[in-house]
Image (tube, rainbow, N blue to C red):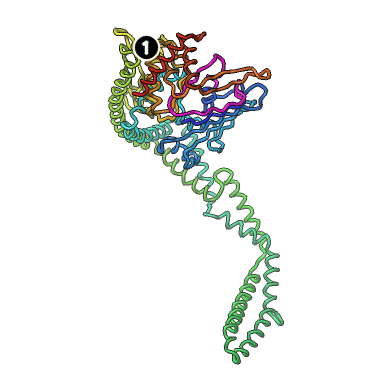
Amino acid sequence: MLIELSIKNFAIIENLTIPFEKGLTVLTGETGAGKSIIIDAIGLLVGGRGSVEFVRHGSSRAEIQGLFFIEDHVHPIYKKAAQLGIEISDDQMVILQRDITAQGKSICRVNGKLVTLAILRELGETLVDIHGQHEHQHLMRSERHLSLLDQFAEDKINGSLQEYQHIYKLFVALKKQINQFSENEQKLAHRLDLLQYQLNEIEKAKLTPDEDSHLNEERTKLANGEKLYKTVHDSYHALYGDNKGLELIMQAMNNIEEAAFIDKDLAPLKETISNCYYLLEEAAYSLRDYYEAIEFEPNRLNLIESRLNEITQLKRKYGDTVTDILEYASKIEEEIENLQNREEKIKGLEKQLESVSEDLLIEARNLTEQRKVAAKQLTEKIHQQLKDLFMEKTKFLIEFKERQASQTDRFNADNNIRFHEEGIDKLEFLITTNPGEPFKPLAKIASGGEISRIMLALKTIFSTNQGVTSLIFDEVDTGVSGRVAQAIAEKIFKISTKSQVLCITHLPQVAAMATTHMYISKKQLNNKTVTNVTSLTKQEKTEEVARMISGVEITDLTISHAEQLLDQADKIKAI
């Protein structure tokens, strides 16, 4: 749930911190005081589209910060955060932060870590679901209906969907291979010529693994031959010869050997010096052999330079190392073989595709059947929700259609089905509000009041499956009154018993059901508009509900009406 929201220099809000509680929080107040601006701020906090227009006039940036407490230890945000390398501490707190500069740049953070806007949106969608006029349009889009049904039936269809998608990936890969082999002859001929030329060029070079490394080492030795000769020669003569290192060590060895006859405790030292002498003597002979074998070969150095230059030219074309070049040669050799045997390859792939297509169609049909069972259950739930909202005559229908393939998309000549990542189903939510009238898409519903109730019914069901911690209803009560308004109020309160709900409303019935009632006001201070948020006491709440009933003037009658409405709300909430 959202525990606290901090807003700075956002639209008309200069500096505002709002604590939130569990249950239903209602926001009411003057027109233009900033109710919707607060919702806009939350929308931006969870990844909504930003604009420089949100930055308060005269400020360099707008800052929005939200503190969320995650009660559910298996909440989707834990998995997403782990995938993105974001840590959520043991206190189960998540802090989202978004700044928008006066230049229009967005700076996003999650628990202090800088993230992209896309990541902020991905995480934000698991925490907050904003349901307003824009969401009406969102739910009306038929392309979203399949994913909504799948969310509703996730536990029932997840295994089948995963199995279908596993085979679908193989299907797509096979089609891609066939398409590559089926390109026009001229293009393939050019490709074959190019690959053959490249392979010939690499084979002609007769490269050996790590050849460049060995040549570079040899070149370094040859280029420094004189220095090597002198240093090794001098090292040898420092050890071997009259009054040189080995002769002095021999004297020490002879002396210590004589001393060891007198004091046996010196025996280990005698052994050490003796071993050192013979090791150094052997090293001296090796140094002599090394410098005597050094040959100055300018021609060999030229040959190495020429060979390395040849290898460098090949590296520019085919890889960073000789190993990469040889691997590339092996790869194109296989492609050449495939192109030369193209017809046989195509026939083999087409046979594979036919087999995979048959398996895929079986999985797709199975997925469709499971979705239809889920659609029936969803329809029953939506009918119950609509009945609760006094729309018992309204009927809901989920229409299934198969995705139709174009001539080029068909996987065989006898079938017109187009496989898609999500299956072969294409569905749409239809509705009829009066008996005898045909079913129509949601977008064709004319009445604002009907739209609000239908969307609330859908949201009541889908919000449970989406697992969000906070739901926001922004004036979803448009165009309703009386008993319908009361039904909407009770429906929103019922949702708030399972998820935190924030609601901007003009209906006194909804305000009366609030667990927490916040009043938004504005005033002029130093020629600037300042927005204030106040949590109302019981008496203040009664007066605000009375104002919402009367519209203008609060009278004894409206106060009495407000008290009755609040008493009735308390009784409903206690059930």
Q: Quadrant of residue 17?
A: top right
Say which residue label 1 marks: 483
Q: Is residue 261 above or below residue 290?
A: below
Is 573 in the magenta? Answer: no
Quarter that holds the C terminus: top left
Magenta-drawn segment: 9-37
Amino acid type for the residue under numbered disc 1: Arg
Instruction: Return the x and y of residue 488 as percentages of the image width and height.
Output: 39, 17
Task: Decide which of 500, 372 is in the foreground and name it.
Answer: 500
Residue name at image x 34 percent, y 31 percent = 154
Q: Position of residue 409 (x, y in %)?
A: 38, 25
Q: Residue furthest front?
A: 556
The image position of residue 477, as x and y in percent, is 43, 15
Using a 10 Å C-alpha cutoff, classify the residue at mark 1 as few (fewer than 14 neighbours), some (14 to 19) or many (20 or more).
few
Query: In the shown orientation, is residue 241 left or right of residue 433?
Result: right
Q: Secondary structure at mark 1?
A: helix
Is residue 163 at least partly visible in the picture?
Answer: yes
- The residue nearer to you, when weighing 540 against 185, is 540
Asked whether 158 or 564 is in front, the reply is: 564
**Looking at the image, which residue is at 44% across and 41% down?**
335
Q: Position of residue 197 (x, y in %)?
A: 52, 41
Residue extending furthest bottom? 262
Residue 48 sits above or below residue 341 on the image: above
Position of residue 360 relative to residue 396, above or below, is below
Which residue appears at 45% of the width and 26% of the height? 129
Relative depth, front residue between 425 and 178: 425
Quadrant in which residue 211 is drawn: bottom right
